[in-house]
Amino acid sequence: EVSKNGHNFTVSPHNWFWEMFPTWENGTFKVFDNYAINKNVLDIGAWIGCTTIYLSKIAKRVVSIEPNPLEYGRMISNIMLNKCGNVHTVN
């Protein structure tokens, strides 16, 4: 489990990235906190879902696009682990 700006996430352990997630791109997440609350959000190039699962906690709805089939599968896994019911994904 990892935390970012007071939000907790369950993540699959097979990716090195989650160890640095709490301090990764803090400015980006401040923008999310200022502009995405209760909005419909498009996440293009969603990779393993790090921004998608964060946005799912604050946004009204998230459409998440990831073209890489391997990373798309990892993103789906992380979305399912976090029960992100307001996320629609596109591969």
Image (spheres, rainbow, N blue to C red):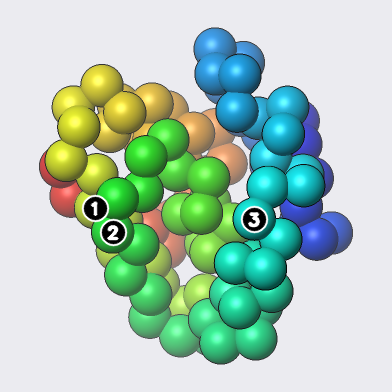
Q: Nearer the viewer, mark 1 or mark 3?
A: 3
The amino acid type found where label 3 is placed reads Glu
The amino acid type found where label 2 is placed reads Ile
Q: Nearer the viewer, mark 3 or mark 2?
A: 3
Q: SS for tag 2? A: strand
The answer to which image quadrant residue 19 occupies is top right
Q: Are marks 1 and 2 in contact (CB under 8 Å)?
A: yes
Q: State the residue position of label 3.
A: 25
Please provide percent x and percent y for residue 83.
52, 45
The residue depicted at 69 percent of the width and 40 percent of the height is: 21
Q: Residue 3 bears which disc, if any?
A: none
Point out the image quarter for the C terminus: top left
Q: Residue 65 bears which disc, if any?
A: 1
How many numbered marks does the figure carry? 3
Sooner in the amino-acid sequence: mark 1 or mark 3: 3
Answer with left or right where residue 1 lies relative to residue 16. right
Point out the image quarter for the N terminus: top right
Q: Are marks 1 and 3 in contact (CB under 8 Å)?
A: no
Q: State the residue position of label 2.
A: 44
The residue depicted at 35 percent of the width and 62 percent of the height is: 43
